[in-house]
Amino acid sequence: MIGFWNVRGLNSPAKQKYIKWLLHHHKVGLFGLLETKVNPSSLNGIMDNICSGWCVSTNTQYHKGGRVWIIWKPNMFNIQFLEYNAQFIHTFVKNLVTGFCFNFTMVYAFNGVYERKALWSRLIALNSQIQGPWFIGGDFNAVLKPCERLGGVTTEEEMEDFQVCLDQCNMVDMPATGSFFTWNNKQEAATRVSSRLDRALVNYEWIEERPELYAHFHTEGYFDHTPWLVQHSSDMGHRKGSFKYFNMWSGSNLFLPCVTQIWGTSIQGTPMFQFVKKLKLLK
């Protein structure tokens, strides 16, 4: 199982204890930690405290404070580190238990709209190199729609930049359960701000190979960000997934001929029945 959390500082014994419980209780083998604020000299001691025997890699050399950590069980995952950046770590992962291989990018975006532009550009560039399933997870410090923020200010520029990046990379939100808002400022109602900053994004190849996986966002509890885990649908019984249309399909030479063929199919019944039946055939 994969998990993520923006811990907003990992020096607290209470947070270390909680992460240790989370990893053990949910049998997590690959986990992303953001904004750890840990001095490099303290890294090994903290790792021994929360997950002794695990491996860790950070982007500390690209941004002080270790904005992004990836920790993993070496007997469960083999990881090839391909690129380090101030706002992400990009890897290629093989699950040693299932054999499933995928591209994996752990993101912690900068707070400023203009600072994030470099992140969006780099992810778009990475897309041209990606083959097969791709998973991007983390804290993007931006929302896609006005409804993803209550209180505070949402700008068209931050939403547009983010959406253009996802469209160019052919990424969509993984099916999710749990908390919709993943961060809040812990203030009273009049000044409270809640946002959907943390996301699990996947490409079409991922959905094709692992449609049974979904993200579950826990409650934030005493903390401002919620931890979240990628889980198997069997963990919550049968789930019927919803159909999703991907914009990239329209770019295929097979798209319009397929639509034309289905829409030209002769179906008996009322106009509404014919319409619904054709939609199902097209799906």
Image (cartoon, rainbow, N blue to C red):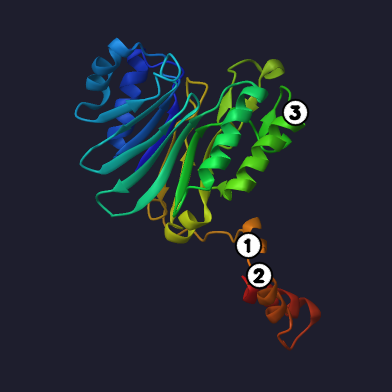
Furthest residue to the right? 271
Q: Quadrant of the N terminus?
A: top left
State the CA–CA distance, disc 3 to disc 2: 34 Å
Mark linked to residue 249: 1
Secondary structure of the residue carrying tag 2 is helix
State the CA–CA distance, disc 3 to disc 1: 29 Å
Mark linked to residue 124: none
> What is the quadrant of residue 64 in the picture?
top left
Q: Could one spot residue 253 in this view of the protein?
A: yes
In primary-sequence order, the first of circles 3 and 1 is 3
> What is the quadrant of residue 110 in the picture?
top right
Q: Which residue has dot 3 on it?
A: 155
In primary-sequence order, the first of circles 3 and 2 is 3
**Residue type beneath disc 2:** Phe
Q: Quadrant of the C terminus?
A: bottom right
| Residue at the image position 28 percent from the left and 54 percent from the top | 98
Residue 20 position within the rendered picture, expressed as x and y whole percent measured from the top left: 29, 26
**Residue type beneath disc 1:** Trp
